Image: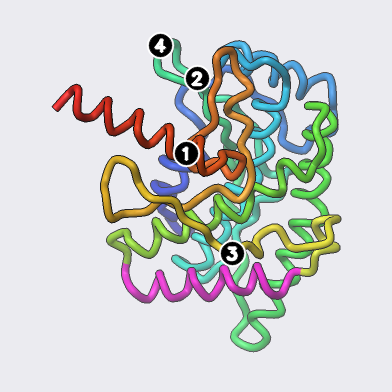
């Protein structure tokens, strides 16, 4: 008997599910990220929609979709206590875009929902071993291939992982989710950050090890937003600007943008 798992959160926010995305602009086996010309073709399609000035922007968003796979595995461990197979050989990479509905999303269709039970003894070692295989065999080669296709350094993709994970953790902490699931998510996140050596990422540091920084929310005084750990390249569009939480934005630029937002709110009050 097949166990029914709920992919609602992963499908809604991360565009990862057995059903896949709703409006497929393009699709390919995820195991073929190494086909540089093919991934460049997909970058061109997505880049045209957002008026990207080069491949950095689509390369950034396609690269960080791999972080979303890691987050989905974390959510599965926290919710079901099982290891979910998200190896690239078990996935199709998809661009989700509906004409007239904003920018494209990048996601994955899970071909077969395969899980492993975590053993009662040495469970952490079992999970850590799975992370090391997944990162070293799937995520790292894909990040490097995507960066090559985009003409960017892999570091520009890796730098974003810490901030993305921190934003998801904040969502988990504040969402209406059972306390025991929140506690398990926190535990599993610490395992990912502390037990997986930097070598698996082909870096000097595990990219999930990042100290959270905040900026004041210009729309709600007294509240804060998590600053991104790395630039998402969203300003590399025609007439593009930096995100308010971009780490490349200077304090003066952020103050200027804050004043612009406040003036706009006052004008529409």
* Count of marks, rendered view: 4
Specify few, some or many for label 4: CA neighbours under 10 Å numbering under 14, 14-19, or 20 or more: few
- As helix, strand or loop, the secondary structure at mark 1 comes to helix
Q: Nearer the viewer, residue 253 or 156?
A: 253
Q: Earlier in the sequence, mark 3 or mark 4?
A: 4
Q: Earlier in the sequence, mark 3 or mark 2?
A: 2
Above or below residue 129? Residue 30 is: above
Residue 43 part of the magenta-drawn span: no
Q: In the image, what residue occupies the spot 37% across and 76% down?
A: 180
| Cβ atoms under marks 1 and 4 closer than 8 Å | no
**In which quadrant of the rendered image does the C terminus lie?**
top left
Specify few, some or many for label 3: CA neighbours under 10 Å numbering under 14, 14-19, or 20 or more: few
Residue wearing tag 3: 211
Residue wearing tag 2: 97
Q: Nearer the viewer, mark 3 or mark 4?
A: 3
Residue wearing tag 4: 100
Above or below residue 146? Residue 192 is: below
Q: In the image, what residue occupies the spot 75% across and 56% down?
A: 135
| Cβ atoms under marks 4 and 2 closer than 8 Å | no
Q: Nearer the viewer, mark 4 or mark 2?
A: 4
- Percent across and percent down for residue 24 are 54, 21
Q: Earlier in the sequence, mark 1 or mark 3?
A: 3
Residue wearing tag 1: 254
- Where does the magenta region start and end? 178-196
Q: CA distance from mark 1 to mark 2?
A: 31 Å
- As helix, strand or loop, the secondary structure at mark 2 comes to loop
Q: CA distance from mark 4 to mark 2?
A: 9 Å
């Amino acid at each position: 008997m097949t166990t029914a798992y709920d992919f609602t959160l992963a499908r809604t926010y991360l565009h990862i599910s057995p059903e896949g995305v709703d409006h497929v602009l393009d699709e390919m086996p995820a195991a073929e990220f190494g086909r540089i010309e093919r991934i460049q073709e997909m970058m061109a399609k997505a880049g045209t929609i957002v008026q990207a000035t080069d491949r950095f922007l689509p390369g950034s968003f396609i690269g960080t979709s791999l972080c979303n796979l890691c987050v989905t595995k974390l959510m599965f461990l926290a919710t079901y206590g099982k290891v979910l197979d998200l190896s690239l050989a078990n996935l199709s990479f998809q661009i989700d875009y509906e004409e007239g509905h904003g920018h494209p999303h990048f996601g994955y269709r899970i071909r077969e929902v395969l899980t492993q039970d975590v053993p009662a003894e040495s469970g952490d070692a079992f999970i850590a071993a799975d992370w090391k295989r997944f990162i070293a065999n799937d995520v790292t080669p894909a990040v490097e291939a995507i960066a090559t296709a985009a003409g960017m350094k892999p570091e520009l993709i890796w730098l974003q992982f810490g901030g993305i994970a921190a934003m998801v953790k904040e969502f988990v902490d504040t969402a209406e989710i059972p306390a025991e699931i929140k506690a398990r998510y926190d535990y599993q996140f610490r395992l990912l950050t502390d037990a997986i050596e930097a070598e698996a990422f082909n870096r000097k540091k595990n990219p999930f090890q990042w100290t959270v920084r905040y900026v004041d929310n210009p729309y709600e005084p007294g509240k804060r937003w998590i600053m991104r750990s790395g630039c998402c390249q969203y300003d590399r569009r025609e007439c593009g600007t930096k995100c308010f939480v971009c780490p490349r934005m200077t304090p003066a630029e952020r103050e200027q943008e804050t004043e612009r937002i406040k003036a706009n709110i006052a004008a529409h009050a």
